[in-house]
Image (cartoon, rainbow, N blue to C red):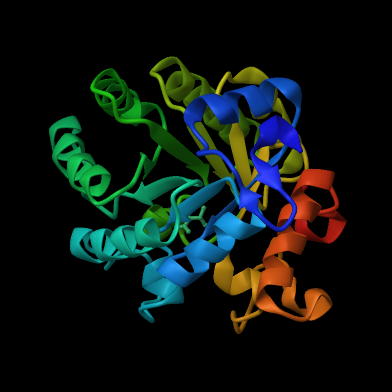
């Protein structure tokens, strides 16, 4: 029972904070994150011991039927953050700032305020070193920040598609430098999406903040999956995802199995990772 935060059947027994997650990293205890969007799923996540909930702008694709995250608005994010918050009072709740709502530090401050006042305890933003002043500004003013590197879906048009990032030496060095700059600026978490496992390992060992992988191998401090993928609702699931409902048989069972497999290092396995 790591830190008394998870109890069989009762789920999370204490609120998860940034300090809990840093301590887990220090002690090599993995934590689970799920991207989800509504109160009933958020309540179930608390019972199943999911430490971190992400109200991701992936909701544009998983809930609203868009073909990218770009159309997602602040109002949509706030609506879903409020719903998730009503269902869960123990997991750490982070909300995405959507496309072009943090293009300047001042804009980030205004929009982070709205997401935090809707119930989030952390905001997530996509991008590298250029965001360091924004991270510093938010962090200095009491807003925890999760950075997001590798495949950053809001930049899908610039990246030329949803593709693995960091395969060339130059790209890998850039992502590592970005991670260090964001860590130094005060970021509290880092999502690494679709990067080679060896690069994710290097970054995880080089930064003080915990890393959360999605398609980033087994060596990150945590994993994140989208609830639709966990429950097999995605028509063409990405390579890094897994349908836990098939083995578990019911929805709470699928969430518990995901949490357990992350913590024991069973998930992700070879077929889910990139080299
Ligand atoms: O929007 C989202 O759900 C995300 C995760 C896939 C990391 O950014």
Lateral position of residue 266 relative to residue 52, left or right: right
Q: Is residue 274 visible?
A: no
* Place of residue 14 in the rendered image (x, y in percent of width and height, measured from the top left): 55, 39
Camera-nearest residue between 79 and 164: 79
Residue at 51%, 20% (x, y): give it.
Answer: 180
* Place of residue 182 in the rendered image (x, y in percent of width and height, measured from the top left): 43, 24
Residue farthest to the bottom, as pictured: 235
* Place of residue 63 in the rendered image (x, y in percent of width and height, measured from the top left): 41, 77
Residue at 46%, 60% (x, y): give it.
Answer: 160
Residue at 45%, 56% (x, y): give it.
Answer: 88
The quadrant in which the N terminus is found is top right
Number of numbered markers? 0
Residue 201 occupies which quadrant of the picture?
top right
4 relative to 91, above or below: above
187 relative to 119, above or below: above
Camera-nearest residue between 74 and 66: 74
* Place of residue 235 in the rendered image (x, y in percent of width and height, measured from the top left): 60, 84
Residue at 61%, 58% (x, y): give it.
Answer: 47
63 relative to 176, above or below: below
């Amino acid at each position: 029972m790591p830190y008394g935060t998870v109890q069989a059947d009762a789920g999370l027994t204490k609120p998860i904070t940034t300090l809990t997650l840093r301590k887990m990293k220090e002690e090599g205890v993995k934590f689970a994150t799920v991207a989800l969007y509504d109160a009933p799923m958020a309540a179930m996540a608390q019972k199943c011991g999911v430490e971190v909930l992400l109200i991701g702008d992936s909701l544009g694709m998983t809930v609203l039927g868009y073909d990218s995250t770009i159309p997602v608005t602040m109002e949509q994010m706030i609506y879903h953050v409020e719903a998730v918050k009503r269902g869960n009072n123990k997991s750490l709740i982070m909300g995405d700032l959507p496309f072009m709502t943090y293009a300047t530090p001042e804009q980030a401050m205004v929009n982070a305020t709205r997401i935090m006042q809707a119930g989030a305890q952390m905001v997530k933003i996509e991008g590298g070193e250029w965001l360091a002043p924004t991270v510093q500004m938010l962090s200095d003013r009491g807003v925890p920040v999760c950075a997001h590197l590798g495949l950053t879906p809001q930049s899908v048009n610039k990246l030329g598609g949803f593709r693995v990032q960091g395969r060339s030496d130059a790209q890998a060095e850039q992502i590592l430098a970005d991670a260090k700059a964001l860590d130094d600026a005060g970021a509290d978490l880092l999502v690494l999406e679709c990067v080679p496992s060896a690069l994710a390992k290097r970054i995880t060992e080089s930064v003080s903040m915990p890393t959360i992988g999605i398609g980033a191998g087994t060596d990150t401090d945590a994993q994140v999956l989208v609830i639709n993928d966990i429950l097999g609702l995605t028509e063409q699931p990405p390579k890094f995802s897994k349908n836990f409902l098939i083995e578990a048989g019911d929805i709470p069972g699928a969430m518990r199995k995901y949490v357990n497999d992350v913590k024991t290092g069973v998930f992700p396995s070879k077929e889910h990772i990139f080299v």
